[in-house]
Amino acid sequence: MLSIITDIFQLAKKDILLEFRKRETLFSMGLFSFASVLIFSTLFNFIDISLEGKQAISAACLWFIITFMVMLGLTSVFSRELKKNSIYSLLSLPIKPQAIFLAKLFYLVVILSFIEIITLILAVVFLRITLQVNFLLLCLVLTIGTLDLCVAGCIVSFLTIYAKSKTLAIPILFFPLILPSVLIATQTTTNLVLFDDPMTVINNTLLLIFHAAIILTFVLLVTDELIGE
Amino acid sequence: MSVINRENPPIVKLTNVSKVYGFINAVKDIDLTIEEGETVGLLGNNGAGKSTLLKIISLLITPTTGKIELFGKEVKEDQYLFKREIGTLLSHSFFYEDLTGRENLEFYLKMNRRTDDHVKVINNMVKQYGLKFFIDRPTHELSTGMAKKLELLRVTLPYLPKLLLLDEPFSGLDVENKQFIKNIITERKSNTTVIICSHDFNSISHICTKVYYLEKGRINIILEPSEFDYFLNKQN
């Protein structure tokens, strides 16, 4: 058990180091986040709706941004290995295939969390997501929702390792898989921002955990087949 | 004196192994047995199936049909346990080009969990390989020869694998670097079973104890050292 954790940590550390060295994915995610927040913020200045309405829409905007940031992050999950057709560099390592999946998941969660913190600050400033709500619960929803999206995203990355038309295959597989999570996460965040109803939030968060757990269990059972060929 | 212990099982045993890509039979009905301590060459033209066969033996790809036995055990589940004993060098680099040579080597050392004293091991070996001034550069800045040396270091440095698989180790190298790599293989082959893929018989004939000539995915000829000169003359 300890060895698989060490493997996951070492693999993820390598990917994070490479990402922070080049900052390609971080930059594109950050830029997308900033541009989106700015566009939605400008839009709010031109429409006449109440503060509550703006906050409800802001919660949806936040998940829209996060969803597309995960999409951007997905492209980098195996990009380094596939760059020089060296997926074999990973396959030659004496580690369980599940460790590769969990390491890629860990990497995606780390870089996404990094950009999400910046996005949240931007959202608070520009989209007026108020921090009067239970901040811990908001963080919980964001964390679980993000984790759920990343799990779904990683399975799509695994499924499309050898796909020739990745740009087509990724959205086709990714969106149906994440739709339930995004809807629940948006509803939960809106609920939290508007009504501060902890029970609904906790129930919905449990649903998100359940969704992530199902996908994760499934993918860990079939990782050998997915990464084989 | 041969280091082969006949009481030991073969290091590699392939039975009726085939690999199909779409409609192409890359490898057909291969039966191959390689004993411990042998240095075997897989010879053939481009597209003969050498690299596919090497990838099958290194467990990087799964054969469509057939049985693989490595170190006396059939390979079914938990392939990662077998990979601990295999060092694979393919024609393209395994290195992450934005990491330095040292970072790449440290990564592979840690993933193989062979030693804790990474810095000391790497420093000792890079001097021998003449890589002292290149080890802290990103690998994409290295020349073909240096990159190849570094790759060879990757598969030999972390541990002494029981099975060393080399795909075209001499391609793109000058005479000096070719000789260096030949010396390293000769040094290692007393402790390791080596399989070398090449399309150039000249470069492997002095190292190998047996050569399999592949054509259209099948083993056509098996050459013993006594037949090397005859085959070489015939080729020339």
Image (tube, rainbow, N blue to C red):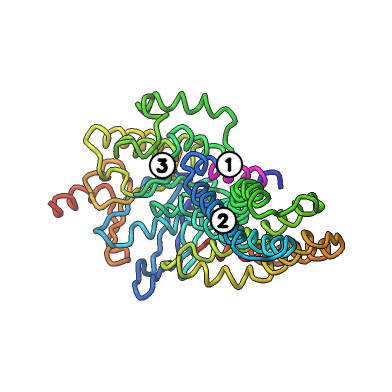
Is residue B184 found left or right of A30 in the rendered image?
A: left
Q: Are marks 1 and 3 on the same chain?
A: no
Report which residue position mark 2 lands on: B79
Label 3 crowding class (10 Å Cα cut-off): few <14, some 14-19, many 20+? Answer: some
Amino acid on which the number 3 mark rests in the picture: Glu
Q: Residues within 10 Å of mark 2 (few under 14, many from 20)?
A: some
In the image, are marks 2 and 3 on the same chain?
yes
- The chain containing the residue under callout 2 comes to B
Left or right of B178 on screen, residue A18: right
Q: Which residue is mark 3?
A: B97
Figure disc tally: 3
Mark sitting earlier along the chain (2/3): 2
Residue A165 included in the magenta stretch of the image = no
Q: Point out which mark residue A13 bears.
A: 1
User: Magenta residues?
Assistant: A5-16
Whole-percent x, y for residue B176 in the image:
24, 32
